[in-house]
Amino acid sequence: MTTTNARDAARAPLTRARVLEAAVALADRIGIEALTIRRLATELDVKPMALYHHVAGKEAILDGVVDLVFSEFDDPPPDQPWKDGMRHRCASAREVLRRHPWATPLLESRRSPGPATLHHHDAVLGCLRRGGLSWELTAHAYALLDAFVYGFALQEAALPSAGGAEMVDMADQMAQAFPAGQYPNLVDFTTQHVLKPGYAFGASFEVGLDLLLNGIDAAARR
């Protein structure tokens, strides 16, 4: 941001939307645990008490930023077959959570979900029902798909590197450090898979997602 843009932003009227957008940007930089009213006020160049005109406290901020994250998720396109729609939605959710890794543990934790959260959940339920799933299977499918997407996002965020040369170098160093003859399966996995050209941890996302969707489809047909 240029000096002029920063000054313009500082002069912009304080609104709830501006507070929440700043909170998301700050959480992206420092993490959600480090985000406080005081840090957010400093970010917005206002007094902490000014924020309370727009948000009641940190819990209200968390409600708001979670809703903003959900607003970035693509809904399953209604004109696509249900599996294609869910594949699109899950891929979008993964990309959003790569931008906001702090958000994953919070997504289903809010007791006051916002309109974007409710709209997205409604759209996902509608997509699953278009596939002929019973309500019971819909509940299982939604839980399993989100567990997969959220869990994969947590793994990607925790890895030193999710792929590319850094992952290969790290795996190579680890394999060389193993005592000779120990952990043979890990050595074979590393040398025969991870160290092969083109390896990327993220490639498992589409494979796992297809396995889940095909399994859900098979259950619905039964």
Image (cartoon, rainbow, N blue to C red):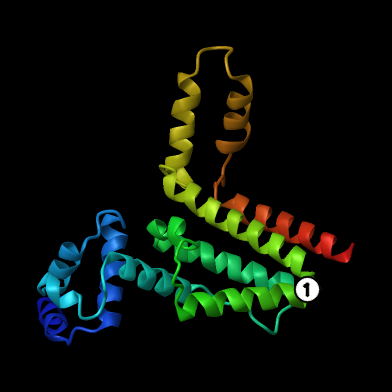
Residue count near mark 1 (Cα–Cα under 10 Å), binned few <14, some 14–19, many ≥20:
some
User: Looking at this view, is 85 or 114 the one in front?
Assistant: 114
In the rendered view, tell whether residue 108 sits above or below residue 183.
below
Which quadrant of the rendered structure holds the N terminus? bottom left
User: Looking at this view, is 90 or 182 the one in front?
Assistant: 90
Which quadrant of the rendered structure holds the C terminus? bottom right
SS for dot 1: loop
What's the residue at 48%, 33% (across, down)?
Answer: 171
How far from the left and from the top, in percent, is residue 60? 32, 70
What's the residue at 46%, 76% (across, down)?
Answer: 71
Question: In the visual, does 2 lie left or right of 146?
Answer: left
How far from the left and from the top, in percent, is residue 19? 25, 76
Q: Classify residue 49 by image quadrant.
A: bottom left
Check disc 1 and report the residue beneath it.
131
How far from the left and from the top, in percent, is residue 4? 11, 81
In the rendered view, tell whether residue 36 sits above or below residue 41.
above
Q: Residue furthest bottom?
A: 13
In the rendered view, tell whether residue 164 sits above or below residue 118.
above
Q: Classify residue 183 by image quadrant.
A: top right
User: Looking at this view, is 3 or 212 the one in front?
Assistant: 212
What's the residue at 48%, 30% (across, down)?
Answer: 172
What's the residue at 54%, 51% (across, down)?
Answer: 151
Q: Amino acid at mark 1?
A: Gly
How far from the left and from the top, in percent, is residue 211? 73, 54
Q: Residue furthest top?
A: 180
Question: In the visual, does 137 lie left or right of 113?
Answer: right
Question: In the visual, does 11 lie left or right of 25?
Answer: left
